[in-house]
Amino acid sequence: MIGTLKFLHESFAFALILFAAALGAWGTIGFLTRRHVTGGFRSAYVMMIVLAGIQGALGLILITTTQPRALLHVVYGAFAFLFLPGVYFWAGRGSRPREAAFLAMACWIVAIAFARGVATG
């Protein structure tokens, strides 16, 4: 059972890195071409928040049932899970160009955070 959870946690980590980078590219292109954030982008962003939550839940199960190797790993995951919805709600209250810029930047930032989380352990 632990092996399966560890496999899922590792697989989701790489999927989230790719997903965040893809959303970052999508958001950056939209911002540079002066397009507003679309419903599809918002939906994908919320999906990334949900997947980060699932990833975190798997991580919590693993950390409570096994010996953690690096607690810094947990910090990167917690940061991403708290940062993504914070930016989503904060950026949505401003102008459309600001929303596009901040959501794209948030995707790049969490892609790096997810990658650092993988690198630490």
Image: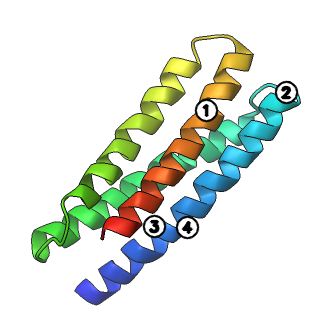
In the rendered image, the quadrant that contains the C terminus is: bottom left
Who is closer to the viewer here, 55 or 113?
113
- Residue shown at the point (35%, 38%) measured from the top left: 82
Q: Which residue is mark 3?
A: 13
Is 43 rendered above or below residue 96?
A: below
Q: Earlier in the sequence, mark 1 or mark 3?
A: 3
Is 121 on the left-hand or right-hand side of 104?
A: left
Mark 2 closeness class: few <14, some 14–19, many ≥20 residues within 10 Å:
some
Is 61 on the left-hand or right-hand side of 41?
A: left
**Is there any visible trace of residue 1 in the rendered image?**
no
Q: Earlier in the sequence, mark 3 or mark 2?
A: 3
| Identity, as a three-letter code, of the amino acid under mark 2 | Arg
Q: What is the C-alpha distance between the residues marked 1 and 4?
A: 19 Å
**Is there any visible trace of residue 12 in the rendered image?**
yes
Q: Earlier in the sequence, mark 4 or mark 2?
A: 4
Q: Which residue is mark 1?
A: 103
Q: What is the C-alpha distance between the residues marked 1 and 2?
A: 13 Å
Where residue 30 sits, quadrant-wise, is top right
Is 47 rendered above or below residue 117?
A: above
Q: Which residue is mark 4?
A: 15
| Identity, as a three-letter code, of the amino acid under mark 4 | Ala
Mark 4 closeness class: few <14, some 14–19, many ≥20 residues within 10 Å:
some
Q: Badges 1 and 4: C-beta atoms under 8 Å apart?
A: no
User: Helix, strand or loop at disc 3?
Assistant: helix
Q: What is the C-alpha distance between the residues marked 4 and 3?
A: 5 Å
| Identity, as a three-letter code, of the amino acid under mark 3 | Ala
Q: Residue 18 placed where, x, y %?
A: 61, 62
User: Helix, strand or loop at disc 1?
Assistant: helix
Q: Which residue is mark 2?
A: 35
User: Helix, strand or loop at disc 2?
Assistant: loop
Q: Earlier in the sequence, mark 1 or mark 4?
A: 4
